[in-house]
Image (cartoon, helix red, strand yellow):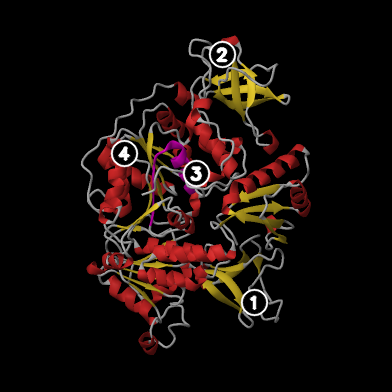
């Protein structure tokens, strides 16, 4: 397991200027009323990214505390903020007074101040940017209401299976029960196995780790990608630690419920919290464990500045709070693999051969000479005969899952004659075809929505269209004709089916929209693997394997008759990793390739996007660290939203990551201080790199 020492290249190593929790508590003596308040104002300009000192009016002195909301005059206007310190002295001789104390409720705790400062510096953002992600908006009625007593969690005997089934799992549980700040990644076997409580392998592992930490008298934070998984983990945990003992944080709660749960955590009443990416900042008292599920899911990446990722925030917080960290997933990202190879995180998981014995077997169409002899067109056709054989055999035992990369009918079009991609003549967006009543179709642009009566190829003049990418609706239509009388379920786009019964049915779904079966799918067919692998994205192969393993986890084990069929290039590395059920080996090779190509996480990459003038001013103001390399600027792909913008990439060795982020932030501060025109977006190690 990972030790308590901070490694040279861990996520927290790129933070600078972090103030300790003791400093954040203030230095005023307890019997003397504080005179100075250090405030984090709601100001997003990079050149003003610091705390400001104000004097405390006598009327506020008795109630003022670290973490309360205040208002103060700043640059001629009123600005909201939070008190982050109560120092005895200030570098400024004459201080302006605080204007108002909005609430006496401390909702920004000292340990959060340290974390938010570190996250802002790590991603070249501002403290105010991170603050709005961490603390929900105030709900005055909820704050004034009497808080319902929060029940203490129960600690029943630890259930079996889960982490205990894999090498290293029991050792991890024993060490966190003793309060050790160990760090591990658990490769969960992708198999269908549930108990009477509805828990499968990974939720059972979360329960085991949670109970171990609760017995040690410490708190637990569980972070998952979406609300569906929040409710699922909450319901499973509630059957062990008790109903009502678990707080949850996500945007679908509504302002009152969200703030009430946040207050329960800040007031040290709730000891177990389950939430989406924003919950990673929640002020859990005596935090003993952070659990994070499926770090490869892009929902864990914040789409707003400073574009932080919950995986890395959890890693930074684990070091600062000296608590245990458990990341688990069916696959493995290159970022996690880099931590494992550096010894910062320990792996938990069974060897691939043992995993294959516990899961459904995976076959690939046209993966042998015998398969080609039986079906000579297996490599050319989208639905080879093995697909129909797999579906036919699966329907005899239960529901069958068919995974398709995209929703819609004909999701992409090209010229029938020369295969040139069909583009809108107005905005150059890709065209698609939708099915209408009585089988009629119309062609429209996916960007501007324009409907075209006729289309002609600008290259060869052809007017006939073909569909290289077929959506879930068209796939369901084709399979419905092939299996008449079979119940057909389309779970994609805006119509996602959450649960599936045990009776035979044909379920066509896009990745992530697979209905959860009551007794597992008897078979699964993964179509159009080449399309998923061919996306213009650095993480196309990693994401494809993650999606396939997620579908495989819904299929019954081979000993119960479960089977998986994939239609795609059998020689591809990701396909072979699926066949072998070896995500660790795939991640190791992926990390090697990224190191050779100079991509994260082997290097730190800063990506700046904006107009040519904005990027030019950034380059003049930036003092990149020695060894940094500039790539670009280059024009962005033609897209109506990004028309005329350029992209500049600056990359540096991992050990210079803090200096690179600081240089980018300094350059932004210079631009805003000079009020230079032009919007500019800055990202550190962006998830979507294409």
Quadrant of the drawing holding the C terminus:
bottom right
Q: Earlier in the sequence, mark 2 or mark 4?
A: 2
Badge 4: residue crowd in 10 Å (few <14, some 14–19, many ≥20): many
Q: Secondary structure at mark 4?
A: helix
Q: Which mark is residue 313?
A: 3
Badge 1: residue crowd in 10 Å (few <14, some 14–19, many ≥20): some
Q: Which residues are magenta?
A: 310-329
Is mark 2 in CB contact (under 8 Å) with mark 4? no
Residue 176 place in picture, x, y as percent: 32, 42
Image position of 546 with respect to 476: above or below: above
Dot 4 corresponds to which residue?
213
Q: Which mark is residue 77?
A: none
Identify the residue at horizontal 38%, vertical 90% (top origin).
Answer: 373
Q: Earlier in the sequence, mark 1 or mark 2?
A: 2
Identify the residue at horizontal 67%, vertical 46% (top origin).
Answer: 664
Q: Earlier in the sequence, mark 1 or mark 3?
A: 3
Badge 3: residue crowd in 10 Å (few <14, some 14–19, many ≥20): many
Image position of 642 with respect to 100: above or below: below
Distance of label 1 from label 2 (alpha carbons) = 70 Å
Image position of 534 with respect to 27: above or below: below
Dot 2 corresponds to which residue?
60
Task: Nearest to the eye among marks 1 and 2: give it.
Answer: 2
Residue 109 place in picture, x, y as percent: 48, 28
Distance of label 1 from label 4 (alpha carbons) = 58 Å
Q: Secondary structure at mark 3?
A: helix
Q: Secondary structure at mark 1?
A: loop
């Amino acid at each position: 397991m990972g030790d308590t020492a901070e490694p040279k290249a861990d996520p927290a190593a790129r933070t600078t200027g972090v103030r300790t929790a003791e400093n954040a508590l203030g230095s005023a003596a307890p019997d003397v009323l504080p005179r100075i308040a250090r405030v984090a104002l709601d100001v997003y300009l990079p050149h003003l990214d610091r705390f400001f000192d104000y004097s405390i009016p006598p009327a506020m002195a008795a109630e003022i505390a670290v973490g309360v909301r205040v208002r103060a005059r700043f640059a001629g206007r009123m600005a909201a903020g939070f008190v982050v310190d109560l120092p005895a002295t200030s570098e400024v001789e004459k201080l302006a007074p605080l204007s108002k104390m909005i609430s006496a409720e401390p909702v920004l705790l000292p340990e959060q101040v340290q974390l938010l400062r570190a996250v802002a510096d790590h991603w070249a953002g501002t403290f105010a940017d991170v603050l709005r992600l961490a603390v929900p908006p105030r709900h005055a009625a909820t704050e004034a209401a009497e808080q319902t007593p929060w029940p203490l969690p129960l600690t029943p005997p630890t259930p079996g299976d889960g982490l205990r089934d894999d090498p290293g799992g029991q050792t991890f549980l024993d060490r966190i029960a003793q309060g050790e700040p160990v760090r591990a990644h658990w490769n969960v076997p992708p198999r269908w196995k549930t108990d009477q409580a509805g828990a499968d392998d990974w939720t059972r592992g979360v329960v085991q780790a949670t109970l171990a930490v609760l017995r040690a008298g410490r708190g637990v934070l569980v972070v998952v990608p979406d609300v569906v998984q929040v409710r699922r983990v909450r319901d499973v945990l509630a059957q062990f630690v008790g109903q009502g003992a678990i707080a949850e944080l996500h945007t679908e709660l509504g302002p009152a419920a969200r703030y009430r749960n946040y207050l329960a955590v800040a007031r040290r009443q709730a000891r177990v919290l389950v939430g989406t990416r924003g919950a990673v900042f929640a002020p859990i008292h005596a935090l003993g464990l952070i659990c994070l599920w499926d770090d490869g899911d892009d929902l864990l990446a914040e789409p707003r500045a400073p574009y932080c990722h919950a995986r890395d925030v959890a890693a930074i917080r684990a070091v600062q709070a000296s608590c245990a960290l458990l990341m688990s997933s069916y696959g493995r990202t290159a970022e996690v693999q880099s931590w494992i190879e550096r010894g910062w995180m320990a792996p938990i998981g069974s060897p691939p051969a043992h995993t294959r014995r516990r899961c459904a077997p995976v076959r690939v169409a046209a993966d042998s000479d015998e398969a080609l002899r039986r079906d000579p067109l297996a490599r050319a056709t989208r639905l080879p005969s093995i697909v129909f054989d797999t579906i036919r055999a699966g329907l005899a035992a239960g529901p069958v899952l068919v995974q398709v990369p995209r929703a819609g009918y004909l999701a992409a079009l090209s010229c029938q004659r020369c295969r040139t991609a069909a583009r809108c003549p107005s905005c150059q967006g890709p065209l698609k075809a939708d099915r209408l009543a009585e089988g009629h179709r119309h062609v429209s642009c996916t960007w501007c929505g324009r409907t075209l009566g006729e289309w002609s190829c600008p290259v060869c003049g052809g007017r006939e269209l073909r569909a290289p990418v077929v959506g879930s609706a068209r796939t369901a239509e084709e399979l419905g004709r092939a299996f008449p009388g079979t119940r057909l379920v389309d779970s994609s786009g805006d119509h996602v089916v959450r649960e599936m019964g045990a009776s035979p049915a044909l379920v066509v779904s896009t990745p992530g929209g697979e209905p959860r079966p009551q007794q597992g799918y008897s078979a699964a067919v993964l179509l159009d693997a080449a399309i998923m692998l061919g996306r213009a994205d650095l993480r196309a192969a990693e994401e494809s394997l993650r999606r396939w393993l997620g579908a495989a986890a819904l299929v019954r084990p081979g000993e119960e008759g479960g089977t998986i069929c994939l239609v795609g290039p059998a020689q591809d590395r990701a396909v072979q990793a699926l066949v072998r059920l070896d995500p660790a080996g795939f991640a190791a090779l992926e990390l090697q390739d990224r190191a050779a190509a100079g991509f994260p996480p082997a290097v730190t990459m800063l990506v700046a996007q904006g107009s040519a003038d904005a990027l030019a001013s950034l380059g003049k103001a930036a003092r990149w660290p020695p060894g940094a390399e500039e790539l670009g600027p280059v024009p962005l792909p033609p897209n109506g939203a990004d028309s005329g913008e350029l992209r500049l990439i600056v990359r540096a060795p991992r050990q210079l990551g803090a200096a690179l982020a600081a240089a980018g932030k300094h350059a932004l501060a210079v631009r805003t201080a000079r009020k230079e025109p032009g919007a500019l977006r800055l990202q550190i190690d962006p998830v979507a790199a294409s």
